[in-house]
Image (tube, rainbow, N blue to C red):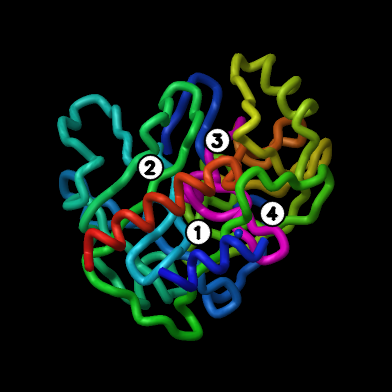
């Protein structure tokens, strides 16, 4: 816990209208290159714990992810998927369906001001039932100080197991793709035509007017990484890798205080 706070202070498929939650244009990589990555596995009906979202390890007991991962409004499914019994976390594996360590969840903390129809404050913390053992394939990530701003056209990296094309299947192998942050006003203007609001607590990234670099189905909650920091969480976008519409990410620096408080309070509860 102390190490997590020091790392902070030292500076890391659902639909909404035409908007889809979201690695397009990616190349294979291994977990040892991005050991902060975690998979969130969900179970429903006859489907037993398949990878549905991604996240970032914060401490030996905490994983940062997107709030929308825990909302299911599918017809005929009458289950509360915000309950931890429907979820497990896999860490330390380059592969979507096997390897690494799989751990039960003890608790899910969704940001209290999360708005599911606009994706504002789209973040949550999953608390693990068992302590992680750090290794070359399992490490904690770092988040930026509160209100840190990143300039447009800054190079970032997205990593995950999401689909590699729109309406495609998730990737079995861990993938990575480089992209650039997009000017906030440009992103806001483009999404306005779809009826989506890009707030100051969101950050946009992609390869504008070129396309081919984006998150896609299965990447939700995964980290957008800038200079080793978790600066964004995959939230939503229009299609996948669209040249006109960049991906939209929860801006972690807008929520650093909430993240630290949530981790601190639940760590104290365990002691």
Contact? badges 1 and 4 (CB < 8 Å): no
- Measured from the top left, where is residue 226 in percent x and y? 70, 58
Quadrant assignment for the C terminus? bottom left
- Measured from the top left, where is residue 60 in percent x and y? 36, 71
Marked residue nearer the N-terminal end (4 or 3): 4
Q: Nearer the viewer, mark 4 or mark 3?
A: 3
Residue on which disc 2 sits: 69
Badge 3: residue crowd in 10 Å (few <14, some 14–19, many ≥20): many
Q: Gap between marks 3 and 1, in whole Å?
A: 16 Å
Q: Gap between marks 1 and 2, in whole Å?
A: 15 Å
- Measured from the top left, where is residue 52 in percent x and y? 38, 50
Residue on which disc 3 sits: 236
SS label for mark 4 = loop
Marked residue nearer the N-terminal end (3 or 2): 2
- Identity of the residue drawn at 51% across and 53% down: 222
Nearer to the camera, 150 or 76: 150
In the displayed structure, 51 sits above or below 249; it is below
Marked residue nearer the N-terminal end (1 or 2): 2
The stretch of residues the image draws in magenta is: 217-238
Residue on which disc 1 sits: 161
Marked residue nearer the N-terminal end (3 or 1): 1
- Measured from the top left, where is residue 243 in percent x and y? 76, 36
Q: Left of 256 or right of it: where is 203?
A: right
Q: Gap between marks 4 and 2, in whole Å?
A: 23 Å
In the displayed structure, 266 sits above or below 1; it is above
């Amino acid at each position: 816990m102390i190490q997590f706070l020091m790392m902070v202070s030292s500076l890391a498929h659902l639909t909404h209208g035409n908007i889809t939650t979201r690695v397009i244009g990616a190349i294979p990589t291994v977990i040892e290159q991005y050991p902060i990555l975690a998979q969130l596995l969900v179970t429903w009906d006859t489907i037993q714990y398949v990878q549905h979202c991604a996240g970032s390890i914060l401490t030996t007991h905490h994983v940062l992810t997107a709030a929308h991962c825990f909302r299911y409004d599918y017809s005929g499914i009458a289950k509360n998927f915000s309950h931890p019994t429907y979820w497990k976390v896999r860490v330390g594996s380059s592969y979507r369906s096997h390897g690494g360590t799989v751990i039960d969840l003890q608790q899910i903390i969704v940001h209290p001001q999360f708005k599911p129809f606009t994706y504002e404050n789209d973040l949550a913390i999953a608390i693990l039932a068992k302590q992680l053992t750090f290794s070359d394939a399992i490490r904690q990530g770092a988040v930026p100080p509160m209100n840190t701003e990143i300039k447009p056209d800054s190079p970032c990296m997205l990593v995950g197991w999401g689909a590699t094309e729109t309406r495609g299947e998730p990737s079995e192998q861990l993938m990575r793709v480089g992209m650039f942050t997009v000017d906030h006003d440009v992103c806001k203007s483009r999404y306005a035509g779809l009826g989506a609001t890009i707030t100051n607590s969101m950050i946009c990234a992609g390869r504008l007017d070129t396309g081919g670099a984006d998150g896609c189905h299965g990447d939700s909650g995964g980290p957008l990484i800038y200079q080793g920091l978790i600066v964004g969480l995959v939230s939503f976008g229009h299609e996948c890798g669209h040249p006109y519409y960049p991906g939209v990410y929860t801006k972690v620096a807008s929520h650093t205080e909430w993240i630290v408080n949530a981790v601190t309070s639940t760590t104290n509860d365990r002691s």
